[in-house]
């Protein structure tokens, strides 16, 4: 029987961040501007995979699910990610169009939380994003077997094969897979969390108002 981990976990500590200065009073009115600033600072300070995020969704029965995925793009309103319509992730995004995102940059003591409704991108935007994928990623999208049971590793190798062979089956000028698409999380609420080496932290929350602008408020730790 596996022993409990309580003692082991009690000895672990939260990393002490090299916290950049953050003054909520001088934060920009648009949280997307602040997000871009924090993301660029994370990359500049060598935070690994700063564009990786946790995506939380729910299924039609209200059961939560979460996984780590990549941020594909950000615009004035939405945070964009990729998923096949036939994958568990895509089914949940399509059938229950709400989601939450978390970006965590522990070296800087920073988190950004995003919550909002979900919509799919138009064909042009989806095609442009698909075209930017590597040949291997495009092959996997065309195979469309994500999250299906893997019964035989040899079968997987045979199915994927040489990416160039499957890509040649695409129509000239086509740059998409039938079920692969971009999904946008339209931010209705964003929270910025800044810790410091002494264990204190600030929480600044942005919420959409009735006319499409943003209201801000500080939260208790």
Image: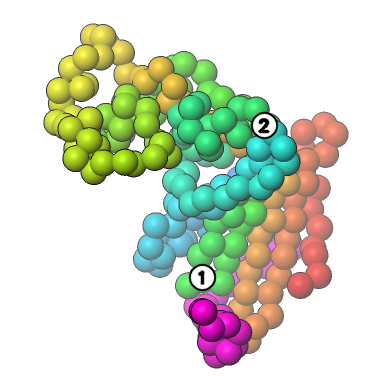
Q: Is residue 12 above or below residue 102?
A: below
Where is residue 83 shown, x and y percent of the image?
A: 47, 33
For residue 181, side relative to residue 112 (left or right): left
- Mark toward the start of the polypeptide (2 vs 1): 2
Q: How many marks?
A: 2
Query: What secondary structure do most residues of the magenta stretch adopt?
Result: loop
Q: Furthest residue to the right?
A: 210
Res 150 → quadrant: top left
Q: Residue at x 78, y 41 (%)?
A: 208
Q: Residue at x 65, y 65 (%)?
A: 193
Could you say whether the residue bearing mark 2 is in a helix, strand or loop? loop
Q: Residue at x 75, y 56 (%)?
A: 205
The span picked out in magenta is 1-28
Where is residue 22 shown, x and y percent of the image?
A: 63, 68
For residue 127, side relative to residue 39 (left or right): left
Could you say whether the residue bearing mark 1 is in a helix, strand or loop? helix
For residue 195, side relative to residue 178 (left or right): right
Q: Which residue is label 1 attached to?
A: 106
Res 27 → quadrant: bottom right
Label 2 and label 1: CA atoms lie apart by 29 Å
Check disc 2: other Cα within 10 Å, few if <14, some if 14-19, many if 20+. Answer: many
Q: Is residue 61 magenta?
A: no
Res 168 → quadrant: top left
Q: Is residue 5 magenta?
A: yes
Q: Nearer the viewer, mark 2 or mark 1?
A: 2
Q: Along the line of sight, which residue is nearer the eye, 23 or 94?
A: 94
Q: Residue at x 81, y 58 (%)?
A: 217
The quadrant of the picture occupied by the C terminus is bottom right
Residue 97's mark? Answer: 2
């Amino acid at each position: 029987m596996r022993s409990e981990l309580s003692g082991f976990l009690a000895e672990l500590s939260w990393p002490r961040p090299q916290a950049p200065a953050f003054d909520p009073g001088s934060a920009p009115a648009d949280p997307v501007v602040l997000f871009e600033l924090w993301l660029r600072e994370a990359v500049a300070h060598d935070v690994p995979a700063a564009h990786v995020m946790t995506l939380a969704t729910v299924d039609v029965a209200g059961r939560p699910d979460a996984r780590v995925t990549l941020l594909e793009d950000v615009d004035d309103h939405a945070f964009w990610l990729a998923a096949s319509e036939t994958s568990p992730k895509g089914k949940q995004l399509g059938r229950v169009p709400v989601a939450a995102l978390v970006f965590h940059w522990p070296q800087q003591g920073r988190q950004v939380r995003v919550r909002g409704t979900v919509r799919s991108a138009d064909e042009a935007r989806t095609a442009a994003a698909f075209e930017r994928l590597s040949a291997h990623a495009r092959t996997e999208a065309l195979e469309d077997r994500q999250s299906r049971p893997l019964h035989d590793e040899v079968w997987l190798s045979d199915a994927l094969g040489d990416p160039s062979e499957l890509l040649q089956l695409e129509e000239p000028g086509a740059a998409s897979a039938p079920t692969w698409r971009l999904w946008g999380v339209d931010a209705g609420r964003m929270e910025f969390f800044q810790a410091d080496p002494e264990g204190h932290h600030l929480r600044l929350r942005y919420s959409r108002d009735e006319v499409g602008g943003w209201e801000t408020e500080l939260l208790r730790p």
